[in-house]
Amino acid sequence: MRKARKFSAIFLTILLLLSTMNVPVFAEKTADLEEDRVYIVNDDFEDKEPETAVEELPESDGYSVVDAWNKDGTVKSEPRIVEDPLGENGNVVFVEDLGDTAVAVVKDIPRQDKPFTVELDFMTEEFGHATKALRILDGSTVAAEVELRQIDGKDILGYSIPGGHEILDDDFQVNKWYNIKLLVDPENQEATPVINDVVMPTYGWRFLNATGISRVLTMAPGGSAISSYLDNLKVYEGIDDSLLNPDTPPDQIEDIEINSEDLSITLTGQVMVWVGVLILLIILVLSKTVEQAFKLVAPVEHKMSFRSGRHII
């Protein structure tokens, strides 16, 4: 009886684990949502040869370099495609900075005046005060930016506001990739930073005379020669409302097509698992009850046999 209970418990555990097999389905749905995005830019640089200079990329790619030469005109920085020195991201853009100017890699995009999202991966091997990890502009006018700053002795990642910075991360780490998003609302001149999937408050733009966005860049600090890296630059239409309002239930979905065969298989599998769990629970309860009954009956039978024996003798 004890062995039967032990086997049942093990089998029950296996069934409970099987009941969690719907997790990959949710991951697949998330991937589908990403595929449904309308991308304006989606560059991972994997189709570029390492050591290709940004200035040599096809004009149709929309990339350019600003302030490559130092102030004396004697040293030229050469931002280029390289392999990720951390070995995590494949090909990346190396924003080389050899001089005392704020060399930048710039991406021109169709001017955006409706809500959109811009994101990139950023990494540096040395902390550079005033490095612009992600800056968005309306022509030459800065709208918003996320940059490195040293504040109160701390290396921080901050969002620029008039007269100062809002701290997004007060312990910025070198040799670590950061995913930086800006959920941009040009109509209200606002942006919401998202750092490594952590949503920050919404802030106004740095300069309100910017009314749309037509350029994205990563820029060296200027003054000190400190290089950095960027990868996976993306610009896509719209803002994920679930990031801004995580507690708001989703809008009702209409005209959705459901594959009845897949739905039937999923539901049938879940029902079968839980029916099996219920049956095993009943077996466990009954086996326990039978064992207790046996313990109660056994002494009585023993006594009856003993008394019967004395009567015969």
Image: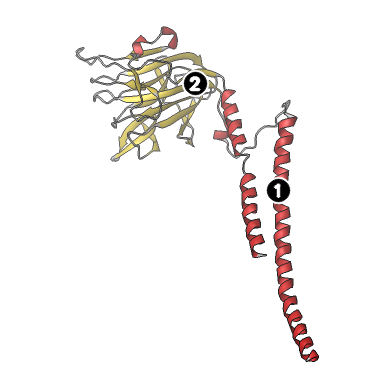
| Circles 2 and 1 in contact, beta carbons < 8 Å | no
Left or right: where 77 falls relative to 278? left
Which one is nearer the viewer's eye here, 295 or 133?
A: 295
User: Which residue does the image show at 38% across and 33% down from the upper left?
Assistant: 158
Left or right: where 230 falls relative to 127? right
Relative height, residue 303 to residue 93 (above, below): below
Question: What label sits on residue 170 in the rendered view?
Answer: none
- Disc 2 is placed on an element classified as strand
What amino acid type is highlighted by mark number 2? Val
User: Which residue does the image show at 24% across and 20% down from the upper left?
Assistant: 98
Residue 310 makes an appearance in the image: yes
User: Which residue does the image show at 80% across and 90% down from the upper left?
Assistant: 312
Question: What label sits on residue 235 in the rendered view?
Answer: 2
Relative height, residue 67 to residue 275 (above, below): above
Which one is nearer the viewer's eye here, 40 or 58?
A: 58
Q: Quadrant of the C terminus?
A: bottom right
What amino acid type is highlighted by mark number 1? Trp
Left or right: where 135 falls relative to 70? right
Q: CA distance from mark 2 to mark 1?
A: 44 Å
Question: What label sits on residue 274 in the rendered view?
Answer: 1
- Disc 1 is placed on an element classified as helix
Relative height, residue 171 to residue 99 (above, below): below
How far across and how far down the image is residue 21, in percent? Answer: 62, 41
Choose the circle earlier in sequence order: 2 or 1. 2
Hey, which quadrant is residue 35 in on the image? Answer: top right
Which one is nearer the viewer's eye here, 303 or 145?
A: 303
Which one is nearer the viewer's eye here, 138 or 220?
A: 220
